[in-house]
């Protein structure tokens, strides 16, 4: 029996590991065992001081590879609103001044965009996924999910800005009203992971 290649997913969000598992299964990539941060000794989170999604994803993936000795996948993602010059962007998770307060982030963004008319509320979720190997190889892939900013939250699913994002490819729904399967098939992160998957497959094939 061939020993699976272990790949660390450097995220505290279990949904991201499941999403990558789903993508690899869909693409027929075998021989990969995904490992979460809970499966390795804890290490301090690196400071995400990059100026782009790609830079921050690489910061996290490099640290994960160094700390674990495994190939590491990490992502950085956020919501880019056209009328706000792409903000919140890389600051999406802490837009309100506190990290990870989804409700406060949504409330502040909606208030800032309250005077923007419907024709100019274009927005996109952006994700950059990075793969870093223990020997220093680095790969990145970016995915975008186009849509628009709603005026109030809708739906109970998903997380982050999902309740106030209306995907262009799911008319009449917010991202929070999609099933996990529907979201994975469309999402920015899913697109980036699908582009990165062949690089992960190469780890198995040597």
Image (cartoon, rainbow, N blue to C red):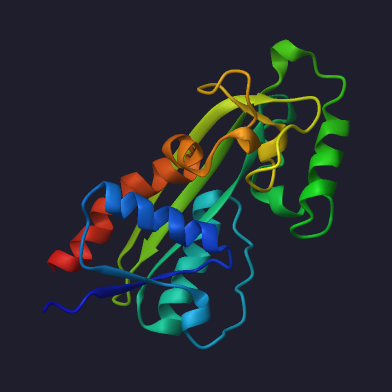
Residue name at image x 33 percent, y 45 percent: 194
Q: Is residue 74 above or below residue 197?
A: below
**In x, y percent, where is residue 109?**
81, 37
* Outermost bottom residue: 41
Compare residues 169 and 179 and report the one nearer the observer.
Answer: 179
What count of labels does the image hold? 0
Residue 16: percent from the left, percent from the top? 50, 57
Viewer-side residue, 62 vs 156:
156
In percent of width and height, residue 95 lies at: 78, 49
The quadrant of the rendering that contains the N terminus is bottom left
Residue at figure coordinates x 63%, y 34% from the top left: 177
Q: Is residue 171 left or right of residue 132?
A: right
Q: Is residue 37 left or right of residue 82?
A: left
- Tell me which corner region of the image, top left, top right, bottom left or bottom right, holds residue 11: bottom right
Q: Residue at x 28, y 47 (%)?
A: 26
Quadrant in which residue 195 is drawn: top left
In the displayed image of the protein, which residue is found farthest to the top? 119
- Residue drawn 79% across and 41% down? 106
State the image coordinates of residue 20 (x, y, percent, origin top left).
Answer: 40, 56
Residue 63, above or below 110:
below
Quadrant occupied by the C terminus: bottom left
Residue 46, picture quadrant: bottom right
């Amino acid at each position: 029996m061939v020993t699976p290649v272990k790949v660390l997913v450097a995220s505290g969000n279990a949904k991201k590991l499941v999403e990558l598992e789903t993508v690899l299964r869909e693409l027929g990539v075998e021989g990969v065992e995904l490992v979460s941060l809970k499966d390795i000794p804890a290490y301090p989170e690196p400071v995400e001081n990059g100026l782009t999604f790609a830079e921050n994803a690489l910061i996290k993936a490099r640290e994960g590879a160094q700390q674990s000795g495994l190939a590491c996948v990490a992502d950085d993602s956020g919501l880019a609103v056209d009328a706000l010059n792409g903000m919140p962007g890389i600051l999406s998770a802490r837009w309100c001044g506190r990290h990870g307060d989804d409700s406060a982030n949504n409330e502040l963004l909606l208030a800032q965009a309250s005077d923007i008319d419907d024709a100019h509320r274009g927005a996109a979720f952006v994700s950059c996924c990075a793969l870093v190997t223990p020997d220093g190889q680095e790969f990145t892939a970016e995915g975008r999910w186009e849509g628009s900013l709603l005026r109030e939250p809708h739906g109970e699913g998903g997380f982050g800005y999902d309740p106030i994002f209306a995907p262009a490819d799911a008319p009449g729904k917010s991202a929070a009203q999609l099933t996990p399967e529907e979201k994975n098939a469309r999402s920015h992160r899913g697109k980036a992971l699908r582009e990165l998957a062949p690089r992960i497959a190469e780890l198995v094939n040597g």
